[in-house]
Image (tube, grey):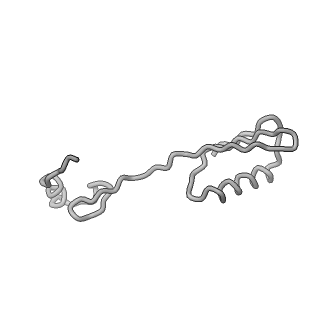
Amino acid sequence: MKIEVKNGTLPQVEIDAYVAKIKRDNPGKYIKSYVFTVDGDYVDVDFEYDIIPFERIRRITGYLVGGLDRFNDAKRAEVEDRLKHNI
């Protein structure tokens, strides 16, 4: 994660407190970067979400799978032989 402080300095304990609060307020989200802009007694906080990688899961021949790598030859043949519907 990238942290940038603009227009001044902040103690590490204050940065850690801002980061902890943002993480608490955004559960389940990955934060890519933080920008803290010091403006006198105030601090503007900007942050950017990171892209969350995901794996596509499909129902193939009665199983929920992400890919065919765990299928044996018979199941792979079943996948090849099945009728695919175009919607």
Q: Position of residue 34 (x, y in %)?
A: 68, 44
Residue 6 location, quadrant: top right
Q: Residue furthest left?
A: 81
User: Which residue, as the protein is rendered here, is positioned at the far right?
Assistant: 41
76 or 14: nearer the eye?
Answer: 14
| Position in image of residue 54 (x %, y %) | 43, 52
Count of residue discs: 0
For the point 18% across and 60% down, which residue is it? Answer: 75
Q: Residue at x 69, y 43 (%)?
A: 46
Horizontal and vertical percent for residue 80?
Answer: 15, 52
**Residue in the image at 76% along x and 55% along y:** 17
Q: Is residue 86 left or right of residue 33?
A: left
Q: Is residue 36 above or below residue 59?
A: above
Q: At 57% from the left edge and 51% from the top edge, which residue is drawn?
A: 30
Pick the residue in front: 21 or 78.
21
Q: Kindly give the residue lying farthest to the bottom in the view shown.
A: 62
Residue 59 position by quadrant: bottom left
Q: Where 57 sits versus 37, above or below?
A: below
Left or right: residue 32 compared with residue 74: right
Residue closest to the far front: 87
Percent from the top left, x then y, of residue 45? 72, 44
